[in-house]
Amino acid sequence: MTDADPDHEETRPAAPAVAGCNHLFGGLHGPCPHLPAPESSTCVWHNPLVDKGDAYVARLVAQAARVARGDLAEAHLVGVQAPGINLAHANLSRADLRDAVLDGARLSGANLAGSRLRRASLKRADLSGADLRGADLAGSNLGGADLADVRFEGAVLDGTVLKGASATGADFTGADLRSLRWSRRSRLSGATGLPEDLAAAVAGPEPAEDDPSADESRVWERAAAHPSALRPAAVAASDLVAPPGPNGPPVPSRTRRGPWLAVAAVAAVLAIAGTAVGAWGLRAAAAVPQDTVRLAAELAASTRQAEANLAEVRRLQAALAAAEEAQTAGRTAVARASDEASMRRAEAEDARRRLSTAEADVARLRDADDRAALMALRLADAQRLGREQAEQLRRQERVGGILADGVRHLRSENTRLDAVVGERVAQERRADQLTAELATVRQEVEALRTERAALAARERRLSEDLTASNTVIQGYLARVADANLGSVLGDEAAQQPLLPVKAGTPIALIGDYMVSLRLDPADGGGVAARLVVQRPAAAANPNISVVLYDASRRPLRRFGFGFPHVDRGAPFTSANAQIACDEFPAFARVIVSPAATLPLGAR
């Protein structure tokens, strides 16, 4: 490495300058801070051919405002859809915001002087402290907006909606107020510069929140002036609606009425003279009533003279209006010429700036030639040092390979030892776990032994119970076989009628035995049956079978009741049963058979 030459300080070549937007501003404003669009000399925000109505444009506007520190002067934003956008303290002077949707936008302290906001929607927007001097607000909607401390000098408000707006501290002095739509919720009492009739209309107590009439629209219009005062207003209106120049709407200038005041004075003198002549004729007619014919002729002549004078006045007024319109067109042309001259001056200034930049580039290139020779020498030294460093690097690579092999060997050995240690630790943990499991198994074996002894004792008891049950069942089967109940049930079943079943209504049978059967739907599903039997004295209890049928007379379930023989006591016997059944039966057949009272083997 070599030390830097103190006599020749190394400097980096400057980066190529990026050409900016060529938009020429109408007022005192520096160059546009935004980059030009591809294949265009102006940026997107000063190009009227770019449609600003797409949804993504709102994000780009907010981003451009942040990059340029809020500078969007004379931006072309017609139809932009940006509700809720934050453009506080932004510079939007002379910007074109016609038909824009800025509901709920933050525009506090923004510079909107000279901007065109025709038909723009600014509902519930924060415009506190904004500058709206000279702005065109015709047809715009400021319903519910915060207009505190806003300046409206020179602004046009024609058909502007101020329903529910708060204009505390706003200054309407010098504003062109033509017509407004407001409601009782519009807080305009704290504003200054309002016409007397509008100030008197909006004055009053604040309405209640639940008052529906407070939201009704009210219209204020400027009172029509006398016809003699309409021409100056028409001239002022023509200044406001004149076609905009290349850099925004022209600034209206003071009307020069010097040569036309004399014409107006002559017309007024002629009108007064005609009126005086007519009055003299009337007085003469009153003084000499006998000469009525002559006075009538003079009166007709005076009337014709007055009409002629009035026609002359109208002609002069038309000529005056035409002259004023011509003068307005001339002022507009002068303004356009002034704007064109400003553009040419700006272009010349830009050309001079580019020329200075080119001269500086030439001087920088000359210095670059001198620095190139010095850099060639430094490059040779750097190449020699590079070769030496490459040789040292190759040696270091060989040493590094040897060290890397040793490190790999040590790592493999450490890995093997770690595996052995891990295996030993796992074996110790497994031994501890097996010891604990062995103790648990011993306890479980002891518990199983105890449980086995208990189960063996229970099995012995159950075996004894089963033997006793088998003995009882064999005896019962012998009784059934001896009584031949199957043939009895089969013969009697065909003779018993089908009885309709109604839930909750008992079925009664009368004969040797009185039988009552009641069927109800069970809570858990199925059928609940309750049977009551009354037997004759000294008679045995019968065996009863019940067969349930569906509506198609198909059997669903069959169940029976058997009772032990009782010689004494009340002659009533009852039983309850719950039978599983998919549906509630429609019919039932009850079969009553005499009880088998003979002992087994008696037949």
Image (spheres, rainbow, N blue to C red):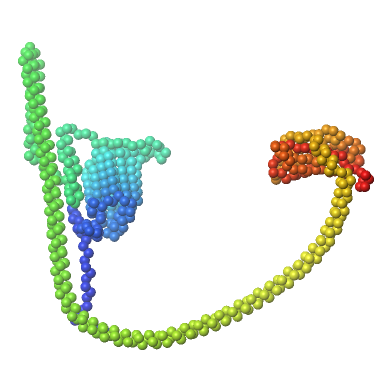
Q: Quadrant of residue 589?
A: top right
Residue at 25% over, 42% down: 138
Judged from this view, the residue extending furthest toward the right is 602
Can residue 111 be seen here? The reply is no
| Residue 285 relative to residue 464: left or right | left
Residue 515, horizontal then vertical, whole percent: 82, 36
Q: Position of residue 122 (x, y in %)?
A: 31, 46
Is residue 290 toward the left or the right of residue 385 in the image?
Answer: left
Instruction: Establish if 370 lies above or below 119.
Output: below
Residue appearing at x 7%, y 36% in the figure: 262
Q: Nearer the viewer, residue 114 or 499?
A: 499
Q: Nearer the viewer, residue 341 or 395?
A: 395
Residue 524, horizontal then vertical, whole percent: 70, 45
Q: For residue 485, say whether it is visible.
A: yes
Furthest toward the top, the residue is: 290
Given residues 89 and 284, the one toward you in this image is 89
Q: Quadrant of the N terminus?
A: bottom left
From the top left corner, tell me how far across and down residue 341 is, in percent: 12, 53
User: How many labels, in total?
Assistant: 0
The residue under the point 23% across, 43% down is: 156
Residue at 24% x, 49% y is 96
224 relative to 303 in the view: left or right? right
Q: Where is 585 relative to 35, above or below?
A: above
Indicate the quadrant containing the C terminus: top left, top right, bottom left or bottom right.
Answer: top right
202 or 25, nearer to the observer = 25
